[in-house]
Image (cartoon, rainbow, N blue to C red):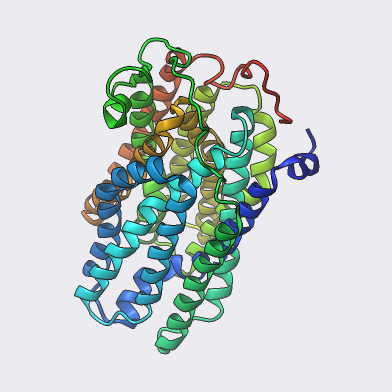
Amino acid sequence: MPIHRRLAELPREVKWLLLGIGLFSLGAGLTLPFLLVYLHQVRGISTQLAGAVIAWIALVGLLTGPLWGVVIDRIGPRVTLLLSLLVEASAVLCLAFVTNVWQAFLVASLLAIGSAGGWPAQTALLSRLVPSPARPWLFGLQFMLLNLGLGIGGLVAATFVDVTRPGTFQLLYVVDACSYLAYVAVLVALPKSVGLAPVSIDPEPQNFVEGRADSTKGGGGYRQLLADRRFLRLLGVAAVMVLFGYAQIEVGLTAYATQVAGVPARWLGIAFAANTATIVVGQLLVLSRLEGRSRSRALCLTGLAWGASWLVIAVSGEAESTWVLLLGLAVGASIFALGETIWSPVFPALVNDLAPEHLRGRYNAVSSLAWNFGSVLGPLYAGVLIGGGWGTAWVGVTVTGCLLGAVGAWRLHAHLDPVQDGRQQPIGVTMGE
């Protein structure tokens, strides 16, 4: 189906949510790339402590995420998203006035608590507004808008910020907080019934096969989730792929390029620009290729793409020419982005097809733990290996980890039914619905 028809057929509520996501991502792009710089160069906090603040955000998110899952299932994803955005907006505003370490950790805790609820609530909300076959396309569109907003916001901020003028950073954080409030306004304008679970849920277990939690037994809640072996397999694959993939794109890539390959820090923007451009340009094309194909096989391709991206960057790092180095970084980052364009629609679609309706919040919250897990451990092992002079070992471990994730995704195929794996549409549901 042509892209313009898909956009036109989206429910009005989805279009409003995409507008809110776009506004939010523009604001986040103003500040996201500069948190370490702001804490260290503007507020005088040491690099080690500033890094610890960023790692603390991931750790707090890891601890509070499951609690948000319960909240989503009890009060609904729309209200939960509202609460999380208000918490995040408060934290971002407070960041503008942080002056010392204890304040940074306190505000980082508030930011982590809010963000731990935002992403699963948003995903659960979107998943209830479109049928299963349309979810990958919607999640991919969401990811494209997010990266477009982050990229534009980052470019605007790069032309404006000045470490010798703290007021420039403060202004960005104030504007960022306002972008959260703009998203809140969009959510408030939606009907209160948007995103609520159906009034009646079929008491019979859906597509019950090996490893599927029975919705009529097991007591429900996280006990039921932990009995779903297929979801746990998917979660294990996600944890491995995030640890050796996403968690390395900012820390491992930056450290390897600057400390091992000798790339000037100012040129790292080329790699990130290539990554963002590939996502924005390629996401819709990739989505059209994914329709009707196995989601588990697609995740396998993601692992292979990410492993290949690290190899390209490692090989280019051995070149003596600066231009070859820069080209290798750009190509490697672009290959990584292609893997992202597969991952972003497929993984959340799989999570939400495995989730029983009454546990959708818990499933999405637990799936988000893979990101926090990788964000805590990924920078640690990258810092130890690259900081210790073992750059080649970092490449080997990271590539091997991506390949292990690909193998795990390949084996997941045998544990999914054709509908959940995207090879077959649910009976009575079409892509145009």
In the rendered image of this protein, does residue 11 appear above or below residue 159? above
Q: Position of residue 326 (x, y in %)?
A: 53, 57
Q: Quadrant of residue 182?
A: bottom right
Q: Quadrant of residue 223?
A: top left
Q: Position of residue 370 (x, y in %)?
A: 34, 40
In the rendered image of this protein, does residue 419 appear above or below residue 95? above
Tell me if I can see residue 395 in this picture: no
Q: Position of residue 66 (x, y in %)?
A: 30, 42
Q: Residue at x 52, y 58 (%)?
A: 272
Tell me if I can see residue 367 in this picture: yes
Q: Residue at x 29, y 69 (%)?
A: 107
Q: Residue at x 32, y 75 (%)?
A: 39
Nearest the viewer among 287 and 336 is 287
Say which quadrant the N terminus sits in.
Answer: top right
Nearest the viewer among 346 and 128 is 128
Q: Residue at x 24, y 51 (%)?
A: 380
In the rendered image of this protein, does residue 64 appear above or below residue 164? above
In the rendered image of this protein, does residue 282 appear above or below residue 262? above
Q: Residue furthest front?
A: 199
